[in-house]
Amino acid sequence: MKLIIFPPIPSILVSLFVFLALRHFLELPERAPRLNGLLKYLWAVALPLLLVMETVGSRWETDTHLLIDAVYVGLMVLLAGVVLTRMRALQPARTLLLALAPFALQALAKFILFVLPIEVGPSVSELILYGKPADLFWFFSIVWLVVGALVAYKQQTLLQQQRLEREVEARIQVRNQELEQLVEERTASLTRQTGELRETLEELRITQDQLIQSEKMASLGELTAGIAHEIQNPLNFVTNFADVSTELLSELREKQQKRTTLDAELEEELLTDLEQNLSKITHHGHRAASIVRGMLEHSRASTGERLPTDLNLLADEYLRLAYHGLRAKNKTFNATLLTDFAPDLPLIEAVGPDVGRVLLNLFTNAFYAVQKRREQLPAQPDYVPTVSVRTRALPEGGVEIRVRDNGTGIPEAARQKIFQPFFTTKPAGEGTGLGLSLSYDIITKGHNGTLSLETEEGQGTEFVIKLPN
Amino acid sequence: MNILVVDDELDVRALFEQRFRREIRGGQLRFAFAHSGEEALDYLHQHASELVLILSDINMPGMSGLELLSRIRQEYPTPPPPAPPRVMMLTAYADETSRQQALELGASDFLTKPVDFAALKQKLLQLAAQDDNTYENENSGS
């Protein structure tokens, strides 16, 4: 009876596990699917063999067993060699091949000596088959194999790591490309949007210019009647004085022709009158011309050129225009105009037509306010609608213009928005809502000045323009 | 005949004085001038009895011609004596509403600017003749 605690592991089972490990280690399913497929069926050979050995073979002699086992192991080593050679492109496969080489060589030598009937000396057989050197070599080859396997494993791990890194890198690159593409797309869409915005801005700018122009034209329209009236008066004077002068001349000529003794006193009087008339014609001609010039300046797009400007003259001219403009629309309207112009007012570098528009706007508003108050209080005969304009030189330099009315005043709610574009308290169609907003821009942005107001509801409003030198 | 011309244009004085130089020299017409409704009222208060005709512009700063007219009609309501001055309105804005308004307020005439001086002269002389007649009649009657 034999005592067996652990039966000797048949090389057949070992080989199955070794090849399973090898297939996995060399990643055969991915790298060589066909070879892998063949090796997968190793069990189909091994298991029947094992079965035979364990059943029928148990009755065979030990030598036969050993022989079959040796042949099987030899075949397996050969198979491993073939597989590794096929996979020699892999560094771990080459290492394994190298690791297997001593063992395989010894086994081969043993087979050759076993199979071929060659008589060799006892030294050779000792060296290869039995004896101490052979055992030593066998031991060495096993150690070599194990170390080689470890090295191969190390290499494989390193390779996998590198591959992993490459994969990560590749993934990063792909992601980068995606990102780059995304950035490009975004950039393109941003560029497009910027272009669209620029176009819109340009359109808005054009619209703004048109609005400013139409606001100018609207105020010009309000003024047309006033201007007509203003021109009519001087023109009447021109024609009348010219007429009268003709009469005077014919009177003089008549007296000359009659050769009557000329009354020296009368002649002197006639000549003085003639002289006076001519100067009056010149004066009123200039007056009409300056009104026309003002009108043209008002309607023309501003050149933005700053010139020394007499603000007294400007204020006076536009006060009259605004008044007569309103009078032409509402014949029952009357207001007292008060002017208090500082005689020593310094000339101010200003864009005359622009400041004129501001004044015109302030006057028009002032007249509107007193007119409204008049309408609200029809039963108050004591109320005298009054619009006044006052100029003075500021002690710190520059000029102040105050436009005051005793109209309705501006309610608190409207005060905050009064300089905002398109804000108007006038009924639709009467105000563009741009007047004060443009005025504010002209004074602050155009002339570095200030435009402020003091107002009391039901008492009146005063706008204060301050222009620096 | 004393005439008060009310107009805010200062040169109206020079113009009238020359237009009517012969009549002034001849003593048929006498002109006084006021530059505002207020001034005109002041003048009227001082010279009420002498004044026969007021020629007033409508569009003036402060008291307008129409206001002046209504004030005059309030202060000097009805004839008889002394007869209240006639008031002729002069305006550059010759529309029917103001004309109606002026006539309702008691204006004796409504003239448009530019003034037709030939026609005005005729009217004034006619009035002056009438005035002289009434004056003479009154004198002879007393």
Image (spheres, coloured by chain):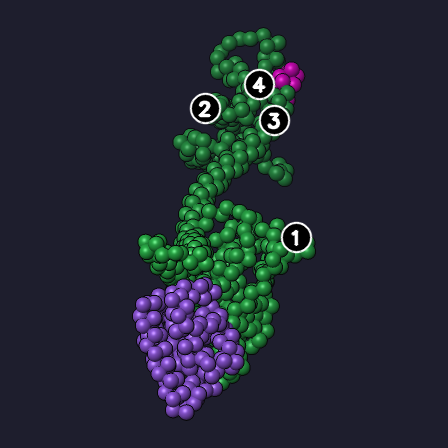
Residue placed most toward the observer, B99 or A454? B99
Same chain for labels 3 and 4? Say yes or no. Answer: yes
Q: Earlier in the sequence, mark 3 or mark 2?
A: 2
Residue B58, can we see it?
A: no
In the image, the chain rendered in purple is B
Q: Earlier in the sequence, mark 1 or mark 3?
A: 3
Q: Which mark is residue A102?
A: 4
Same chain for labels 3 and 2? Say yes or no. Answer: yes
Q: Which residue is mark 1?
A: A397
Q: Earlier in the sequence, mark 3 or mark 4?
A: 4
Residue A256, can we see it?
A: yes
Magenta stretch: give its range: A131-139
Element at badge 2? helix
Tell me where residue A62 appears, x and y as whole percent. 54, 28
Element at badge 1? loop
Give the letter of the chain under mark 4.
A
Q: Which residue is mark 2?
A: A86
Q: Are marks 3 and 4 in contact (CB under 8 Å)?
A: no
Q: Earlier in the sequence, mark 2 or mark 1?
A: 2
Instruction: Please report the residue visible at 53 percent of the width from the left and 8 percent of the height from the top.
Output: A119
Residue placed most toward the observer, A361 or B12? B12
Q: Amino acid at mark 3?
A: Val
In the image, the chain rendered in green is A
Q: Amino acid at mark 1?
A: Gly
Q: Residue furthest front?
A: A261
In the image, residue A95 above or below residue B91: above
Tag count in the figure? 4
Q: Residues within 10 Å of mark 4 (few under 14, many from 20)?
A: some
Give the letter of the chain under mark 3.
A
